[in-house]
Image: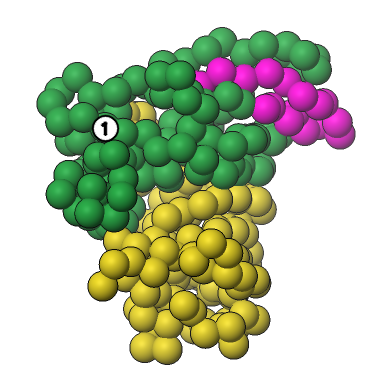
Chain colours: A yellow, B green
């Protein structure tokens, strides 16, 4: 079980992520979409930095949960503006809630995705369900 | 896109393959082996390799961009991941169907309630998108 004191903790910002045209195209094409230079990135693109923030949370020595025992329970985005190629994004994750139910941890997170100027681009809220695993 | 509550939006169909999940893992950074490896997926109690929840949400978002007529108009997007999308090996993959109905039009914002299904299962819980303009 995850330490209840995790609730309320804010993690350091993720390493800056350069949003390149090639990466936006690869992300769009992976979901069967097309992308043209100058278009905004697909709406779910900010998950790239939000997921990096979630990985930092999971790999934190005081948390230490294995990705394979984690189910993504819920995801919400609220956008201030679309992401565009040329953006440099970081995500700062806060654990908003933590509850234990049926042998699983339900970790409610909120990541502020900001640009190079520090302006908010979107807020990405995720619920991670950690099942303890067999080991 | 019609701006009237109750309007049903054209249903869109997408195919998800294992190869696409590999490409998505690379692009998104989510290398959870339950999306690649049958043995690992079964070892954690899943029926087989499943799509990333975010892959399915990306399909819903893609449908929303198509409904909006242009990219960049999504101001809110969200869902619960209620049922897994099991993706069989091979090129045929599995079909995900995205339908939607306009729930509300208010202050230049259109709220669409989506229904995202795979086979008989609703795979997303209350998928909702809010579009501007």
Look at the image and say whether residue B112 sits in the magenta stretch. Answer: yes
Chain on which label 1 sits: B
Please rate how many residues cluster around mark 1, counting C-alpha atoms within 10 Å: few if below 14, some from 14 to 19, many from 20. many
Could you tell me which residue is drawn at 80 percent across and 17 percent down?
B5
Q: Where is residue A97 in the image (x, y as percent from the top left)?
A: 64, 71
Q: In this view, does B78 lie above or below B94?
A: below
Look at the image and say whether residue A70 sits in the magenta stretch. Answer: no
Determine the residue located farthest toward the right in the rendered image: B107
Which residue is tagged 1?
B87
Q: Is mark 1 on a helix, strand or loop?
A: loop
* Secondary structure that dominates the magenta span: strand
Write down the region rendered in magenta. Answer: B98-113
Residue B12 located left or right of residue B113: left
Q: Where is residue B101 in the image (x, y as percent from the top left)?
A: 68, 18
Quadrant of image for the C terminus of chain A: bottom left
Residue B21 appears anywhere in the view: no
Q: Position of residue A131 (x, y in %)?
A: 41, 64
Could you tell me which residue is drawn at 47 percent across and 77 percent down?
A1
Residue B50 appears anywhere in the view: yes
Q: Nearer the viewer, residue A97 or A38?
A: A97
Residue A110 located left or right of residue A20: right
Q: Which of A56 and A21 is in front in this view?
A: A56
Q: Is residue A15 above or below residue A42?
A: below
Task: Tell me where residue B48 sits by quadrant.
Answer: top left
Could you tell me which residue is drawn at 58 percent across and 42 percent down?
B79
Task: Tell me where residue A113 sits by quadrant.
Answer: bottom right
Q: Position of residue A58 (x, y in %)?
A: 39, 74
Could you tell me which residue is drawn at 60 percent across and 50 percent down?
A76
């Amino acid at each position: 079980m995850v330490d209840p004191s995790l609730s309320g903790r804010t993690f350091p910002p993720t390493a800056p992520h350069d949003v390149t045209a090639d990466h936006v195209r690869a992300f769009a094409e992976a979901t069967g979409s097309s992308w043209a230079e100058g278009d905004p990135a697909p709406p779910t693109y900010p998950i790239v930095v939000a997921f990096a923030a979630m990985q930092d949370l999971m790999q934190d020595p005081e948390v230490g949960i294995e990705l394979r025992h984690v189910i993504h329970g819920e995801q919400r985005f609220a956008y201030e503006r679309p992401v565009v190629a040329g953006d440099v994004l970081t995500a700062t994750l806060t654990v908003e809630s933590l509850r234990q139910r049926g042998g699983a941890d339900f970790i409610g997170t909120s990541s502020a995705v900001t640009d190079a100027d520090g302006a908010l681009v979107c807020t990405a809220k995720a619920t991670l369900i950690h099942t303890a695993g067999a080991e | 896109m019609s701006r009237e509550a109750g309007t049903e939006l054209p249903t869109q169909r997408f195919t998800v393959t294992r190869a696409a999940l590999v490409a998505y893992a690379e692009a998104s950074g989510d290398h959870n082996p339950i999306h690649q490896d049958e043995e690992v997926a079964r070892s954690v109690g899943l029926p087989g390799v499943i799509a990333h929840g975010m892959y399915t949400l990306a399909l819903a978002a893609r449908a929303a961009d198509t409904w909006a007529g242009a990219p960049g108009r999504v101001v809110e997007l969200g869902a619960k991941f209620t049922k897994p999308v099991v993706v069989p090996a091979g090129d045929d993959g599995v079909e995900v169907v995205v339908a939607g109905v306009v729930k509300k039009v208010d202050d230049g914002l259109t709220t669409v309630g989506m229904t995202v299904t795979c086979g008989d299962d609703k795979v997303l819980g209350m998928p909702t998108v809010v579009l501007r303009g």
